[in-house]
Image (cartoon, rainbow, N blue to C red):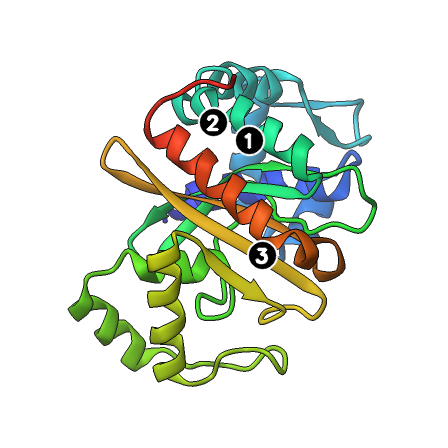
Amino acid sequence: MSKIVERTLDFLELFAEQKKPLSLSDISRLLKIPASSCYDVLHSLQDRGYLYELAPRAGYYTTRRLLNIAHAITDHDPVAMRADLLLRAMRDRVDESILLAKIDGITATYLMSFEPSHPLRFLANTGDHVRRLHATSAGKAILSTLERKPFEIYLKSLKLEAFTENTITSKIELRKDIETGRKRGWFLNREESVEGVMTLSALFNWNSSAYIVTVAGPTVRIDSRLKWIAGLLVDVCNRLEMRQEVA
């Protein structure tokens, strides 16, 4: 990534993280870069209307311009427009976290996240990447999309780290588990990445691209409803692929 682009994004994310006005010296200290390197980015953002100075030496903060641009973009996101109603309806029925991610090679990026009413919930931020491919249902879904040769090449280099006592650490068992997921149409993570958490994931294709829908929540709430949730998940993915609307 271009250094100037990366630094600009660091600036914006810093304001989101700190949630308060910041001076040039604050930004320099928090980002651990020289003040001289911050100056141009800071004043470019100010000139374009993304930042404003509260008062002399009172620090800078973001304007609403970024929010307005974000709304203009997301309101016309073709994937969001396609999936929003179905995934919200699914969230309301299962009352667990529902996540949508797009696959790109052996990575996937979360595009949408719908949270349940429960205070105890699984969280994933929009823009985060799916991690722990061998220990999550979304990761297994990603691996299932690879052709046999690329899959074997990747598997050979993959370190099957144990995150819990349930993590699959055998490459033979991982192959079997992914194949089982392919055959039944959905992939399962039963406390393999985080103790007490279960996730289910299924795939759908749109415009020659693969997407993942994941249901995530505490084992105590999901395990007894596993078959019902899995059936609903597969149905939602089928409807997304066939471009059907919510009934």
Q: Is the residue under label 1 in contact with that under label 2 (CB below 8 Å)?
A: yes
User: Reading the chain from its start, which is encountered first: label 3 or label 2?
Assistant: 2
Res. 78 image quadrant: top left
Where does the image place residue 153, in percent across and percent down from the top left? 22, 75
Which of the two residues, 229 or 131, is positioned nearer the viewer here? Answer: 229
- Under mark 3, the amino acid is Thr
Where does the image place residue 232, in percent across and percent down from the top left? 53, 39
Q: CA distance from mark 1 to mark 3?
A: 16 Å
Residue 137 visible in the displayed image: yes
Tell me the number on the disc at residue 217: none
Residue at 52% x, 36% y: name it: 40
Res. 38 image quadrant: top right
Q: Secondary structure at mark 1?
A: helix
- The residue lying furthest to the left in this view is 149
| Left-right relation of 53 to 193 | right
**Which residue was labeled with disc 3?**
199
Where does the image place residue 139, in percent across and percent down from the top left? 44, 60
Q: CA distance from mark 3 to mark 2?
A: 19 Å
Q: Secondary structure at mark 3?
A: strand
Q: CA distance from mark 2 to mark 1?
A: 6 Å
Residue at 39% x, 61% y: name it: 181
In the rendered image of this protein, does residue 84 appear above or below residue 208? above
| Left-right relation of 195 to 87 | right
In the rendered image of this protein, does residue 163 appear above or below residue 23? below
| Left-right relation of 65 to 219 | left
In the rendered image of this protein, does residue 56 appear above or below residue 32? above
**Which residue was labeled with disc 2?**
83
Tell me the number on the disc at residue 87: 1
| Left-right relation of 191 to 76 | right
